[in-house]
Amino acid sequence: MRHRKDKLKLSRPRSQRKALKDLLVRNLILQEKIKTTLAKAKVAARFTERLISLAKKDNLSSRRRAYAVLKDHSLVRHLFSEIAPRFKNIKGGYTRILKLNHRKGDGAPLALVELMSVAIPESQVKPSKPAESQRETPAGEKKRKPREEKTKVKRKGLGRLFKK
């Protein structure tokens, strides 16, 4: 049974799958958007989000863990100094997957994975307006809609037995 086994295998052995995942994550961090198949896009987005969350901590341990995936000091520096501060006030959702057409040769579903371009700081987020029913009313009163009068229709024959 495959219960609780949520890893995408991508029809590859473990070593090739790891190399592909690392390559997708590197390219996504470097170029900030990549076009690939939908299954690979989901894997790339998942591990990129984990790396960005790791980079927000910005300590030696997290830099070493990021280097284990990215294998490039300049890319680790780029992740920690430019990408992670962009998402400082956000707790997730750093990537976006946009579905595209199917590939012409084999019909594989394509997707565009991209890092969210602009993160909105919390100080600029406007509070949403309260719904009409939540607005303040005088003490003890509740807002009620006026009732519409229903007109009764007399049904003749068998129609009276079957209500609509």
Image (cartoon, rainbow, N blue to C red):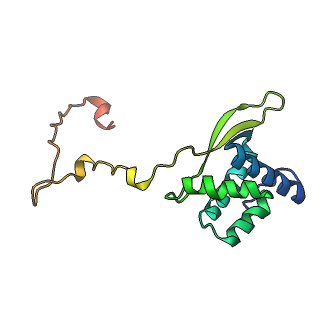
Q: Report the front residue among 40 and 30.
A: 30
**Quarter occupied by the N terminus:** bottom right
Q: Quadrant of residue 53?
A: bottom right
Residue placed most toward the observer, 29 or 46: 29
Question: How many numbered discs, if any?
Answer: 0
What residue is drawn where x is 69% and y is 71%? 60
Q: Position of residue 154 (x, y in %)?
A: 20, 31
User: What is the x, y in percent for residue 69?
Assistant: 78, 60
Q: Quadrant of residue 114?
A: top right
Task: Give the image quarter of residue 151.
Answer: top left
Residue 15, percent from left and from top: 89, 58
Image-based side of 163 in relation to 106, left or right: left
Rendered position, 154 above or below 147: above
**Residue 24 against residue 91 in the figure, above or below:** above
Between 142 and 34, which is closer to the camera in this rendering? 34
Front residue of 82/17: it is 82
Quadrant where the C terminus is found in the figure:
top left
Identity of the residue drawn at 31% across and 38% down:
161
Above-or-below relation of 51 to 102: below
* Residue in the image at 73% along x and 36% along y: 109
Measuring 64% from the left and 64% from the top, which residue is drawn there?
Answer: 54
Q: Residue furthest bottom?
A: 61
Give percent across and percent down for residue 72: 79, 56
Which residue occupies the extreme top position in the image? 104
- Left or right, 35 with respect to 148, comes to right
